[in-house]
Amino acid sequence: MKSLVAVLTVVAAIIALWYAACVPMNIKGVLDQAERAGAEVTPATAKERRDMSEIGLVATNSFAISETWVQERPRLPAPHQVAVELWETTVEKKITSKRSLVYHAQVTLSATLLGFAIGTGLGILLAVGIVHSRVMDMSVMPWAIVSQTIPIIALAPMIIVVLYSIGVQGIIPKAVISAYLSFFPVVVGMVKGLRAPDAMQLDLLKTYNANTNQGFWKLRLPSSMPYLFASLKIGIAASLVGAIVGELPTGAVAGLGARLLAGSYYGQTVQIWSALFAAAILAAALVALLGLIEKLVLSRMGVRA
């Protein structure tokens, strides 16, 4: 109960700060509209208002504060505007509608899951190779680290152009970008997990005359599970980001990235924020699902998380 109260308190504080931030962010647009409607504002001209601070405008035009929370195209939408947009585009729209966030989310989700599967598979195989081969550890691991220093926003267009040039289109380019972002956390977490057994445990296996394969399946792999699931939670979130980023350079017409692009083209900030929240909710759901799978798997294996 105390934890719930603490969480609700933090959420209430964030919402209050959000509403407060909307006032100075949107005040200039509100005053411009009020001036065009014939209302008296201070200062009277748009040029003078541009040179004046937002806080000063709020102080001299307190009557306009309430309007900063209901603008049609605000710089910063109010929480209730985002909530209404989320409701209208998820509950009130058919999931087959191009205006439904559920429709766009499932498009992004398909690329996310495919990329996550590819990245996880490659990451686990690479981690196993690194742990069992010093040559791979010395040669491959540094390149895996260096690969993550390249900004994905710069790499994504190049990946898409190269794949398009050889006829690979659709979901695959987005999945490749997702895999690129998700494989590195899996590699690092799996390597750490496979190396988790201490010297005494390894010596015990040698005492029982266990071979390398038996040591892997009976000791290293079970020991790596908590590390693997921790890295998978990071990887699935990164994979979702990769799928969204992959939709941006292609001018996609479907997906959360496409929804963000459409909102930016037409100045629909409420639409942009609702798409961002939809992505956050989707990521939280995926991480929670992995957490549930983790509990089931570790419980079945008798491994303490």
Image (spheres, helix red, strand yellow):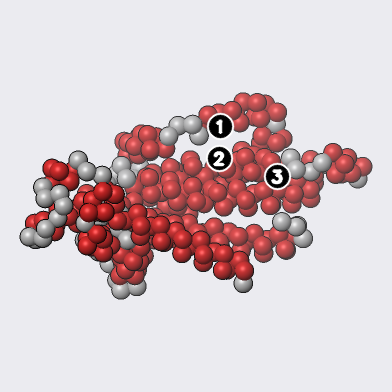
Give x and y (percent) for residue 259. Answer: 30, 55
Residue placed under numbered mark 3 in the picture: 193
Q: Is residue 142 left or right of residue 75?
A: right
- 6 in relation to 52, above or below: below
Which residue is at 45% across, 32% downward?
Answer: 150
Label 2 element class? helix
Q: Locate residue 157: give its quadrant.
A: top left
Per the model, the C-alpha gap separating discs 3 and 2 is 14 Å
Amino acid type shown at disc 2: Phe
Q: Pointer 2: residues within 10 angstroms few (<14), some, or many (20+)? A: many
Amino acid type shown at disc 3: Gly
Which residue is at 61% across, 31% downward?
Answer: 141
Label 1 element class? helix
Give x and y (percent) for residue 52. Answer: 22, 43
Residue placed under numbered mark 2 in the picture: 184
Q: Is residue 42 left or right of residue 129?
A: left
Per the model, the C-alpha gap separating discs 1 and 3 is 18 Å
Return the disc, 1 or 3, that comes first in the chain's sequence: 1
Q: Is residue 9 left or right of residue 159?
A: right
Disc 1 to disc 2: CB gap under 8 Å: yes
Q: Nearer the viewer, residue 158 or 77?
A: 77
Residue placed under numbered mark 1 in the picture: 145
